[in-house]
Image (tube, rainbow, N blue to C red):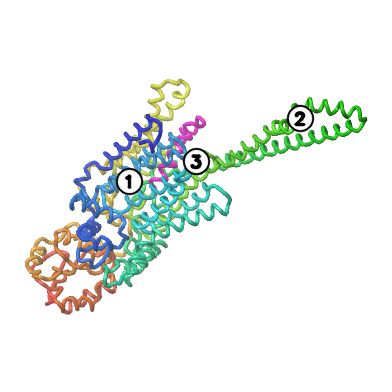
Amino acid sequence: MAWITRRSSDRVAVAGLTVLAAVVFGWGFQRGRTHPYYTAAVRSMGANWHDFVYGAFDPSGFITTDKLPGAFWVQALSVRMFGFHAWAVLLPQVLAATACVPLLFVTVRRWAGRAAAYGAALCYLLTPVTVALSRSNIPDALMVFFLVVAAHALWRWADGGRRAAWWLAGSAAWLGVAFNVKMGQALLVVPVFVWACYLMGAGGRGRRLGRAAAYGAVVTAVSLAWMVFVTLTPAAGRPYIDGSTHNSVWEMVFQYNGFGRIGGQDAGADPLAGGAVLAGAGGPAGPGRIFGAQSAGQISWLIPVAVVGAGAGLWAAWRGRRSSENSQSNLINQSSHANQSSQTSQSNLTSRSNLTSQTSPTSQTSQTSQTSQTSSTSPTSPTSQANQASPSSQADQSALGSHRDQSGPGSQRAKLAGYVFWGGWLAIYALAFCTATGIHSYYTSTLAPPIAALAGAAFAAAARGRAWQLPSLIALTAGWAFLASRETPHYQPWLRWFVVVAAAIAIALLPWARLARSRVLSLTAAGAVATAVFAAPAVWASSVLTRHGASMGSVMASAGPPQAMFAGRHTARGLAGELKEGMRAFERGPDSRLVGFLRRHRDARPYAAAIDGSMAAAGYLAKGLPVLPMGGFTSDAPAPTVGGLAGMVRSGELRYVIVAGQLMGKSGPQAVARDKWVSDNCHLVPGFVGGSKLFDCV
């Protein structure tokens, strides 16, 4: 673990934190349940290399998922290595979340020191939404991991060395990989990385701009490589791209998963737009969304401390840099003045010598002799001039060397760049989540690394600072924990009062620990501080460890009290009814009698049945029944069209159609047209009850 730290004590401590992270993130994960929609894609991709390359949702390679396949590639490789098991699908997320702890420690240590690094590692380890995501195959866990790897590589580059260029290129490449996991959500933070690359780079402005531009170019090339490959593949040779109306991966990435999710409550009117499915989820759009009932307990516990720490750190780093620049300027001016004085003294001595030599011929000989005797020690000799000038030149070199060191990790510029980097990461995602059409609470996991880094740095700086600073941060943390707990008043109602009492004890002990200088009292105070700061997130995170694979837990990946899939959403009565019926049908799963009927009557057809929506199809695919997922995730993609569905029935590829009640949004024109064709040209098969109806089209 030499790459983590050279201190043997730190190696032991970081190894212990990593083991603790593995236990917390992996406890009971083998009993967990995976997200049915994503798991169906992983099963298909793990069984067929063509499906693997194109990210196909179903074994026949008819349609893709509505996401880029980066996360599913990792999960499918795990399935190929260990076989198709729930734990094999979840293992990459457990490993990724665990690896973030030592990576975050190293990255923060290079920026803010050891104490801040330990604080950041603990903050990340106990973030509730991070613990919940580690036992789900939702892509966000892997996206966060790749972002942390990219941040680590960027700070390794800032250290310099022979491999610095490779670290910078690696950072850009990992950002591109993160884009292929979660698309625009990973893309949001790229400007922050590019700006940090510019701030920490050596050389003039032009050189730093060129380096930042090259960094962005590498990110772009890696991000778009798979999309270009799919675009160049003929449509007949690949699956239909879900999330698009024109079989376009660009439309899926930048409209359905991009601009269609931005703009507030009224955005995403088109059912195929990603915003239509999520509109209003996570609470009303606005600054309070990440502090509301759906997200407060998942991520917000340390946001106030992180924001205060970022503001104070930016101010201190900016003032320190200005002071350093002024000191260097004064030093250079002083050395220049010393050089000018030396040159003036040398000129005066030379003039006096010339006047003396002109007085008489006899004195010239004597003067020449005296000059030759004293030339070795005279201030006007070359050796003496060099010795005389050396202090000032050394001062110049020292000042210039100090200026060069400003781009290093321990300098004021690096400290300023760090606060800009982590603060920008936090700000840009918080703004995006507050303005999006709707969010799932697990989206906020992207905030965990910057919150951990800034909070760790804030507590470390306060512990070294004035006596009132650390108690103030403890009071701020406990005060917000009290308010955040009131968002869910029926969940662990004792917790908010416990945190307040722990904070009061910690604040009371801190002055005594400073004055008494007792090791026992210091450890007691440190324990009280840790309890006040981490009790609330730890209790919420621990709730995940006692769950036994509820299906909604696998879909939502939230800690604390269970959340509905579209928690916080206020919808029209008709649409709300469709969603509720869809979720009830999802939780019930496929009718076992219907599954048995389709097995018996499939004959030699490639599809046992066609069914509305990929979410509904996932349950049948999990039972090994090949079904055609019509319309993709939202049920409204034109795959197949009405003409395509009729053609499959005429050709004998398809006989049965299931009209399911599991719709992820309002029925769009494609879904309505297909259902109308089915009702007009097929007859209902009696004997099945529930939300799904079976039609025979032959």
Quadrant for the N terminus, please.
top left
> The disc labelled 1 sits on which kind of residue?
Thr
Mark 2 neighbour class, 10 Å CA radius: few under 14, some 14 to 19, many 20 or more: some
* Residue drawn at (33%, 36%) of the image: 17
Q: Residues within 10 Å of mark 1 (few under 14, many from 20)?
A: many
Q: Where are the magenta residues, as a range?
A: 447-474
Looking at the picture, how far across and down is residue 295, in whole percent?
Answer: 35, 49
Q: Could you tell me which secondary element the residue under label 2 belongs to?
A: loop
Can you say whether 93 is above or below 316 in the image? below
| C-alpha gap between disc 3 and disc 2 | 43 Å
Front residue of this view, candidates 101 and 197 = 197
Q: Position of residue 313 (x, y in %)?
A: 51, 41
Horizontally, is 374 left or right of 30 in the view? right
Whether 591 is drawn above or below 675: the answer is: above
* Mark closest to the chain's N terminus, 3 or 2: 2
- In this view, which residue lies farthest toward the left? 600
Task: Characterize the local packing of mark 3: few (<14), some (14-19) or many (20 or more) Cα atoms within 10 angstroms.
Answer: many
Q: Position of residue 181 (x, y in %)?
A: 33, 56
Q: Quadrant of residue 644?
A: bottom left
Task: Report the label total.
Answer: 3
Q: Nearer the viewer, residue 180 or 525?
A: 180
Check contact, mark 1 vs mark 3: CB within 8 A: no
User: Residue 366 is drawn in which quadrant?
Assistant: top right
Residue nearer the viewer, 507 or 633: 633
Q: Is residue 405 magenta?
A: no
Say whether disc 1 or disc 2 marks the residue closer to the N-terminus: 1
Regarding residue 315, the answer to whether it shows in the image is no
Q: Quadrant of residue 27?
A: top left
Q: Which residue is mark 3?
A: 409
Amino acid at the residue labelled 2: Pro
- Residue 379 disc label: 2
Q: Which residue is mark 1?
A: 130
